[in-house]
Image (cartoon, rainbow, N blue to C red):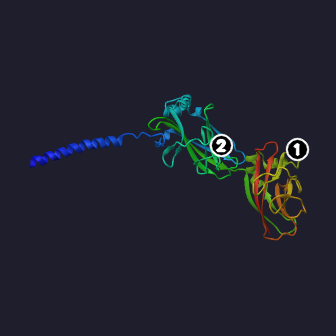
Amino acid sequence: MKKYILKVLIGCLVFSFFSCEDSIEDATGKHVYGEDENPYLKVDVEATITLDVEFEVGRFEPQIVNLADYSEKFQAQIGMTVDEVINGLSNGSIVFYNINVAKGQWDKSEPTKGSNGWYYNSAGGITAESEDFVASLEFNKESKQLMVNVNENAEAGHSFSFNVGFALNGADYDNYVRFAFNVATTDPSLIITNVNIPEGDYASGPVNLYDYADVIQYNLGLTVDEFLANLDSNEGGTIRLYVIDNETGEWDFTSNYTANPPGYWLNADGEVCAWGEEGFSLYAEVNTEDGILNIGRAPELAAGETFKIRFGFRDTTDEMKFIRFIITATLE
C-alpha cells in the first residue's frame, strides 16, 4: 500500500513539473500585438528627445524640427539613417505614431491633420480640426521635418505636452526615437495695470511708460526715449497708438485720433468716439515730453465708476513689433 501511494505522489510531482514548465513558457513569451492594439511603451530615456516650444501671442510662427539634426540618435536607437527611416515609412518597416505617456503605450490613432499629422487640445490629447484645437503637428517626408504650430486664435497661458515617435515595426515598438514636445503660449507684449483718476472734470491718472522699459525693449527693440521719439505724432514716426476691442481683441486700424495725438476719446465700452459725442467717458493721450500715457475723465462722471480699456502701440512698418495694454480705470 505504501509503495502504491509513493508511486502516485511521484507521478503527481512529475506531472506538476511539466505543467509548471508550460506555464513559465507561456508567461515569459512576448505578446504579439494585433493591428487594433496599442503596444506598450518601453521607457528609454536615451531614445527620448525633449523639446520646449514657446509661442508668443500675435507672433505665432511654426516651430521646425529637422530630423537630420538627430541622425546619430536614429542610428543608435533604430540602426538606420534618417533617409532609411523615411523609406521605412513607405515599405512598412517603420511606423510613426503618437505616444500616450499617461497610459504608457503607443497610440495608433489615425491622422487628423493631413496624412501625417494631428491636432491637439489644451490637455495634449488628439482632437479633430473642427474642434477647439490649440496646437498641431505635421510630418513632412520630403523636407524630413516635423512642424509644430498653434491655432491663430490661441490665448496666452496654455501649457501642455504631446509625444510622437518613429519605431521599428515588429512584435513590439521597443526600438524607437521619441520626440516629447512641451508647448507653451505666452504674451510678453501684454501689460495689465490699474489707474485711479482723481476727481475733477478732465482730470487724469498716469501710466508711466518708463516703468515698462523692459517690455518696450523686448517687443519693439527700442529704449523708452527712442519709442517716444518714434511715435507717429512726431515727424517721420512710425509707431501708432491703436484702440483694441474689449470683447474680440481686434485692433481698430481704421479710426483716426480723436484726442490730442497720439490719443483718443472713448465711450464706456472702450470704443473710439469724439469729444462731446453721446456716451463719451474717457480719453487716452501720450505726453511725449515726460513719457506718460494719461487716462482722463469726461465731465460730470460719478465717483466709483470703473472702465476697462485696451490699447496697443504697433510699428506700422513691421506688424510683428507691438505692445498692448489692458487698463482698468477707476474714478475717484
- Horizontal and vertical percent for residue 228? 83, 50
Give 253 or 201, whichever is nearer the viewer: 253
Q: Which residue is under mark 1?
A: 236
User: Is 215 located above or below residue 146 in the figure?
Assistant: below
C-alpha span from label 1 to label 2: 36 Å
Label 2 Cα neighbours within 10 Å, binned few <14 / some 14-19 / many ≥20? many
Label 1 Cα neighbours within 10 Å, binned few <14 / some 14-19 / many ≥20? few
Q: Earlier along the polypeptide chain: callout 1 or callout 2?
A: 2
- What is the number of callouts on the image? 2
Q: Which of marks 1 and 2 is in front?
A: 2
Give 315 or 267, whichever is nearer the viewer: 267
Which amino acid type corresponds to the residue marked 2 in the rendered image? Asn
Q: Which residue is under mark 2?
A: 149
Helix, strand or loop status at disc 2: strand
Q: Do the residues labelled 1 and 2 touch (CB within 8 Å)?
A: no
Which residue occupies 39% across, 39% down?
30
